[in-house]
Amino acid sequence: MTKRSMRERGISFRRSLTRMFRVGLAWAMRRFHRRFVQKSFSLGSEQYFRWDKASSIAEAIENDEVSRKL
């Protein structure tokens, strides 16, 4: 197949082999490629958590846990 491709196109062995690999990889990618879909979930209509205070809340929880362990 490579030699025939070389003769028909007038290209080197290296170019012919590279082209065959690319064609084969493209075929494999099309065959096995699945579209990624991100699942999402509704958190409800009303959110009472203050995301701008998340860091201070995490610090308070960590301090409580350290105090409990001591």
Image (tube, helix red, strand yellow):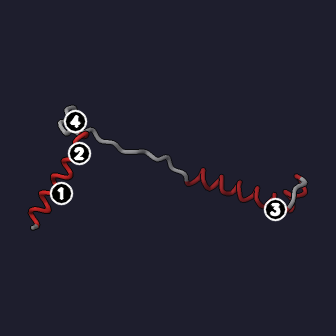
| Residue under the point 18% across and 57% down | 62
Residue for badge 2:
54
The residue under label 1 is 62
Residue identified by numbered label 3: 14
Q: Is residue 47 above or below residue 3?
A: above
How many angstroms separate mark 2 from mark 1 (CA)? 12 Å
Indicate the quadrant containing the N terminus: top left, top right, bottom left or bottom right: bottom right
11 vs 69, nearest the viewer? 69
Q: Is residue 21 above or below residue 34?
A: below
Q: Are dots 4 and 1 in contact, CB under 8 Å?
A: no
Image coordinates of residue 52 in percent, x first then y, are: 25, 39
Residue plotted at (71% across, 55% down): 22
Please provide percent x and percent y for residue 45: 22, 32
Labelled pair 4, 3 in contact (Cβ < 8 Å): no
**Which residue is the site of mark 4?**
44
Tally of marks: 4
Amino acid type assigned to the residue bearing label 3 in the image: Arg
Crowd rating for badge 3 (residues with CA inside 10 Å; few <14, some 14–19, many 20+): few
Q: State the SS at label 3.
A: helix
Mark 1, mark 3: which one is toward the viewer?
1
- Which quadrant holds the C terminus? bottom left
Q: Do the residues under discs 1 and 3 have CB atoms within 8 angstroms?
A: no
The CA span between labels 4 and 3 is 59 Å
Kind of residue at disc 1? Glu
- Give the CA separation, mark 4 to mark 2: 19 Å
The quarter holding residue 40 reads top left
Q: Is mark 2 on a helix, strand or loop?
A: helix
